[in-house]
């Protein structure tokens, strides 16, 4: 390497394994938070007429600290470009870090769903029976939305006559039913009519488990969850809701012959982080899921290149009552949605261990200052009052698929003093479709926009103090954490701050190290504006609009 720094670069494929440090012209490596190792660019002085065995698509690229052998960047080769010019012949090898694995697969996925619209009418034993979605006929307030199954007045009903609708979401995604629940109501009291829930496999009308049956009563019935392996067999993947006539035959004498299903929840089985499917009722104690449970499932289900068995997953507490991606989703998008609800957490994929799998962590964002630095090597700020908002409109879809908008507000002293209301917007698509999720996401979004951070980019070209390890660390060793920076808008108590204040204490959300100047540029509080970042943001916004 032309720059005298103690870093070593290793390339590895099925055909070759070589330390290429002596051929390196330049090295650039980047990490982000959330995300972990993101990208690496290595320029090698090599002849173009030979194909090196150690260079290939999806080959390994690892950067080591030559002083102690620790890994400072790790990932896979993605673009082995080549060029020739006045500077000679060069291989430009671009690699991506472990975080790219979260974009390798796009699959339909359902965790917890509260369906009303979109269920299929099945088992048409009683022609003329109706199924509608709307206000419960027995609720004078019109608040409770229901699936209403009715035998209209004058309709002839044979023995075992029934009207049924079926939820096929899990069958379509290839998942299994883990938990289901509902409440119900009826237009009359009669032991000859009942509301039933039936768990089936692959939509078959034969077999199945009648997991709940309630005789009609105008008082209705409340929640009574049904669980995998306790109330229905492992492997069921559809749930059918129906009203049934158990009498000998007759006709509906009035329009009160209806039963309704409300507050329906359907939950799919989840995996442990180590890859075991959970198929006992004890694994599903609630009608909601937690972000930490979803992260574990992603590791065990879709992210085999991450070491789920040793992953660090901090427990969360926010109750997520709707999370379904029937049209397909990447794990990266799920993680993004989870952070919208758990803004106090982050995720990172780091180096590979002895098993060849990336180390993964889902942890709270740092709250204690880790690094001490100053602005002597360079600093610039993009801080702007344009980042302040005291209102936000959150677009989401309810269980009927109808678009809804929830507006959340907060107090921002600077805007209050100026007599301004600045309102932003968030689109949750149809995946986080519940009022609770909309309120939570809106409040989290506003909390990050109450004070304009003095965000910027800090250049560090010398060792700085790492309070966590108690030693001086080189620029390429700096990782996510809080950093206190002297020499930026000083104030009497600025350097005494121990939590993020956006003036002298910042959260490091990204770092890019260049071997050519042996310096790292840190993104403070927000990513530095770039064409790549703007394109990524635009793609995310377009994807949500399409949904």
Image (cartoon, rainbow, N blue to C red):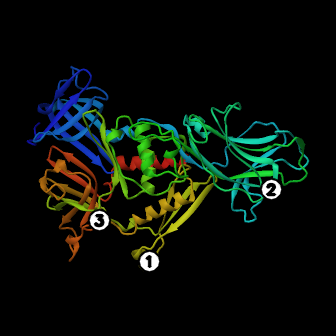
| Mark sitting on residue 231 | none
Residue 352 figure quarter: top left
Instruction: Give the Cα separation between the discs numbered 1 and 3.
Output: 23 Å
**Would you name the residue on which mark 2 appears?**
187
**Would you name the residue on which mark 3 appears?**
500
From the viewer's side, name the closer residue of 176 and 20: 176
- Taking the image as drawn, is residue 483 in sight? yes
Residue 8 figure quarter: top left
**Residue 297: image location, x then y, percent:** 44, 42
**Residue 295: image location, x then y, percent:** 42, 46
Left or right: residue 1 compared with residue 249: left
Instruction: Give the Cα separation between the discs numbered 3 and 2.
Output: 58 Å
Left or right: residue 417 compared with residue 29: right
- Mark 3 or mark 1, which is nearer the start of the sequence? 1
User: Please, what secondary structure does the residue beneath circle 1 have?
Assistant: helix
Residue at image x 26%, y 56%?
481
Instruction: Give the Cα separation between the discs numbered 2 and 1.
Output: 52 Å
Residue 27 figure quarter: top left
- Mark 1 or mark 2, which is nearer the start of the sequence? 2
Query: How many tags in the picture?
Result: 3
Residue at image x 17%, y 35%?
9
- Taking the image as drawn, is residue 331 in sight? no
Residue at image x 22%, y 58%?
458
**Would you name the residue on which mark 1 appears?**
416
Image quarter hosting the N terminus: top left
């Amino acid at each position: 390497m032309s720059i005298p720094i103690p870093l070593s670069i290793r390339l590895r494929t099925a055909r070759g394994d070589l330390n290429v440090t002596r051929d390196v012209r330049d090295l650039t490596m980047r990490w982000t938070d959330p995300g972990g190792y993101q990208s690496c660019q290595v320029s090698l002085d090599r002849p173009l007429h030979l194909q090196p065995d150690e260079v290939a698509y999806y080959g390994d690229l690892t950067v080591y600290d030559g002083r102690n052998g620790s890994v400072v960047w790790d990932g896979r080769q993605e673009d082995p470009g080549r060029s020739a010019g006045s500077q000679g012949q060069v291989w430009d090898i671009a690699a991506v870090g472990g975080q790219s694995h979260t974009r390798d697969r796009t699959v339909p996925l359902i965790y917890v769903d509260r369906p009303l619209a979109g269920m299929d009418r099945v088992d048409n034993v009683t022609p003329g029976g109706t199924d509608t979605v709307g206000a419960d006929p027995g609720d004078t307030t019109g608040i409770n939305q229901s699936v209403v199954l009715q035998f209209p007045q004058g309709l002839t009903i044979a023995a075992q006559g029934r009207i049924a609708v079926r939820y096929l979401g899990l069958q379509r995604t290839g998942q299994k039913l883990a938990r289901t629940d509902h409440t119900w109501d009826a237009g009359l009291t009669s032991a000859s009519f009942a509301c039933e829930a039936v768990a089936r496999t692959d939509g078959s009308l034969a077999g199945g488990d009648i997991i709940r049956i309630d005789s009609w009563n105008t008082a209705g019935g409340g929640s009574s969850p049904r669980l995998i392996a306790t109330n229905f067999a492992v492997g069921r993947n559809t749930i059918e809701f129906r009203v049934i006539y158990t009498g000998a035959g007759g006709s509906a004498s009035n329009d009160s012959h209806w039963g309704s299903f409300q507050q329906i929840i359907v939950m799919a089985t989840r995996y442990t982080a180590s890859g075991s499917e959970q198929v006992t009722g004890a694994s599903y104690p609630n009608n909601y899921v937690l972000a930490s449970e979803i992260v574990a499932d992603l590791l065990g289900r879709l992210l085999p290149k991450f070491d789920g068995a040793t992953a660090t997953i901090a427990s969360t507490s926010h109750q997520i009552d709707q999370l379904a991606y029937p049209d397909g989703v990447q794990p990266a998008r799920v993680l993004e949605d989870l952070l919208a609800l758990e803004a106090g957490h982050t995720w990172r994929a780091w180096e590979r261990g002895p098993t060849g799998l990336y180390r993964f962590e889902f942890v709270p964002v740092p709250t204690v200052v880790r690094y001490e630095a100053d602005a002597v090597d360079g600093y610039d700020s993009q801080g702007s009052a344009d980042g302040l908002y005291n209102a936000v409109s959150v677009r989401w879809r309810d269980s009927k698929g109808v678009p809804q908008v929830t507006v959340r507000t907060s107090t921002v002293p600077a805007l209050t003093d100026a007599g301004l209301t600045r309102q932003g917007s968030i689109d949750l698509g149809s995946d986080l479709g519940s009022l609770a999720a909309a309120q939570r996401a809106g409040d989290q979004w506003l909390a990050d926009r109450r004070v304009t951070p003095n965000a910027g980019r800090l250049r560090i070209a010398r060792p700085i103090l790492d309070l966590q390890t108690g030693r001086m660390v080189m620029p390429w060793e700096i990782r996510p954490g809080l950093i206190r920076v002297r020499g930026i808008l000083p104030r009497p108590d600025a350097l005494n701050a121990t939590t993020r204040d956006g003036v002298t204490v910042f959260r490091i959300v990204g770092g890019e190290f260049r071997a050519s100047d042996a310096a790292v540029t840190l993104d403070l509080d927000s990513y530095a504006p770039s064409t790549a970042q703007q394109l990524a943001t635009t793609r995310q916004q377009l994807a949500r609009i399409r949904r």
